[in-house]
């Protein structure tokens, strides 16, 4: 597919200091924001007010802000996940305000970490507290592992680009302008990932697995546009996966709690079984449905393979190889529809047994 984005072409031609230093480094993005917020210029207050308003949906006026401070890597307590990337403090209308920003670039955010940081911000002196996740790379399109935490707003590249005027007025152009340019390049990398191949990805500034991350997010959009389920994207330690959000089914019975779901990996759509309580074998617990699943997927015209057996808290029960050169969105829709039918027939037969 030919490139449709002039911005992506610019990303191949221009190497900003941000990309040279390493876009994936969270400290770079924190550093630019701290630089602008602590410049002492009037625009710094406008920037602080706009960030607060984005996170809280308030309408705080910059002229009401005094005693503005911003610090990177602030410890909010003891133990794991106790250091927040940026802590912004100021007085407004006679009340102390605290805003914590946690940066994520190419890793999937975690609910537990965000909750601990949120609680750490709330525990500090002040009358108004807010916490936000700022997702700047592949994290923009990734799910938050184990669910969305209450009281944490999610911001992304587009939110920061909306503050370009304040950032430029508050900071040094030599620092801020290339950073904003690289943020714009990242939007192009995200929105036009389907036009890029693995062989050309590095030329446009894609990092490690970000091309696959963005391509899976675009794929999920196409499935939804055709009336299918969204597929959540997650960057794992070994690869990038996408999970059918409506495929989760819990097996009935008195055994260890076991959940079945569809997952897309590099080369296959897999029916998985998860047993995360620390007891039970997911493959053993799901044996009652495996052969029915094979038959159901084959009846839908899908090729199904038996996976390599591995021990763990999750197991692949069967694999549907991705057909290279064919529309992957159609393959995901077919797998989802077949799984829904398999489960309906399984639960009906179980109820009448």
Image (cartoon, rainbow, N blue to C red):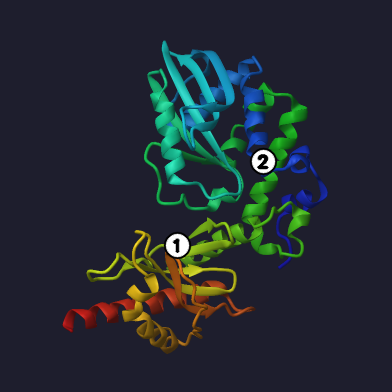
* Label 1 secondary element: loop
* Label 2 secondary element: loop
- Mark 1–mark 2 distance (CA, rounded to whole Å): 29 Å
Q: Is residue 274 above or below residue 163?
A: below
Residue found 66% across the figure and 22% down from its top: 170
Q: Is residue 47 above or below residue 344?
A: above
Residue found 63% across the figure and 19% down from its top: 38
Q: Residue furthest right?
A: 13
Q: Position of residue 127 (x, y in %)?
A: 37, 19
Q: Is residue 153 above or below residue 209?
A: above
Residue 57 visible in image: no
Q: Is residue 159 above or below residue 189?
A: above
Residue found 55% across the figure and 16% down from its top: 68
Could you say which quadrant of the image residue 5 lies in? bottom right
Could you say which quadrant of the image residue 105 lies in? top right
Q: Nearer the viewer, residue 119 or 311?
A: 311
Q: Earlier in the sequence, mark 1 or mark 2?
A: 2
Q: Which residue is mark 1?
A: 230
Q: Position of residue 235 (x, y in %)?
A: 56, 56
Q: Which residue is mark 2?
A: 25
Residue found 62% across the figure and 32% down from its top: 30
């Amino acid at each position: 597919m030919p490139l449709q984005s002039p911005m992506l072409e610019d990303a191949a031609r221009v190497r900003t200091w941000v990309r040279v230093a390493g876009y994936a480094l969270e400290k770079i993005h924190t550093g630019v924001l701290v630089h602008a917020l602590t410049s002492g210029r009037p625009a710094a207050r406008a920037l602080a007010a706009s960030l607060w308003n984005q996170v809280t949906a308030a309408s705080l006026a910059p002229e009401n802000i005094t005693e503005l401070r911003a610090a990177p890597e602030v410890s909010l307590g003891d133990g794991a996940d106790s250091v927040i990337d940026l802590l912004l403090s100021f007085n407004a209308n006679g009340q102390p305000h605290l805003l914590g920003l946690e940066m994520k670039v190419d890793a999937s955010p975690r609910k537990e970490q965000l909750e601990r940081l949120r609680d750490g911000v709330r525990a500090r002196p002040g009358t108004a507290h807010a916490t936000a996740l700022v997702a700047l790379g592949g994290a923009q399109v990734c799910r938050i592992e184990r669910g969305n935490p209450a009281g944490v707003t999610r911001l992304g590249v587009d939110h920061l680009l909306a503050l370009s005027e304040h950032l430029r007025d508050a900071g040094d152009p030599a620092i801020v302008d290339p950073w904003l340019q690289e943020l714009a390049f990242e939007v192009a990398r995200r929105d036009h990932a389907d036009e890029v191949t693995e062989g050309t990805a590095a030329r446009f500034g894609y990092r490690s697995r970000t091309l696959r991350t963005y391509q899976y997010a675009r794929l999920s959009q196409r499935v939804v546009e055709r009336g299918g389920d969204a597929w959540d994207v997650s960057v794992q330690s070994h690869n990038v996966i996408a999970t059918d959000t409506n495929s989760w089914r819990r097996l009935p019975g008195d055994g260890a709690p076991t959940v079945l779901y569809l997952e897309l990996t590099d080369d296959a759509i897999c029916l998985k079984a998860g047993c995360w309580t620390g007891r039970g074998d997911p493959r053993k617990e799901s044996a009652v449905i495996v052969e029915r699943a094979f038959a159901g997927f084959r009846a839908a015209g899908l090729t199904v393979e038996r996976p390599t057996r591995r021990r763990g808290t999750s197991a692949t029960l069967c694999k549907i190889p991705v057909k290279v050169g064919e529309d992957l969105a159609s393959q995901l829709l077919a797998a989802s529809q077949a799984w829904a039918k398999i489960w309906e027939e399984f639960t009906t037969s179980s109820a009448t047994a």
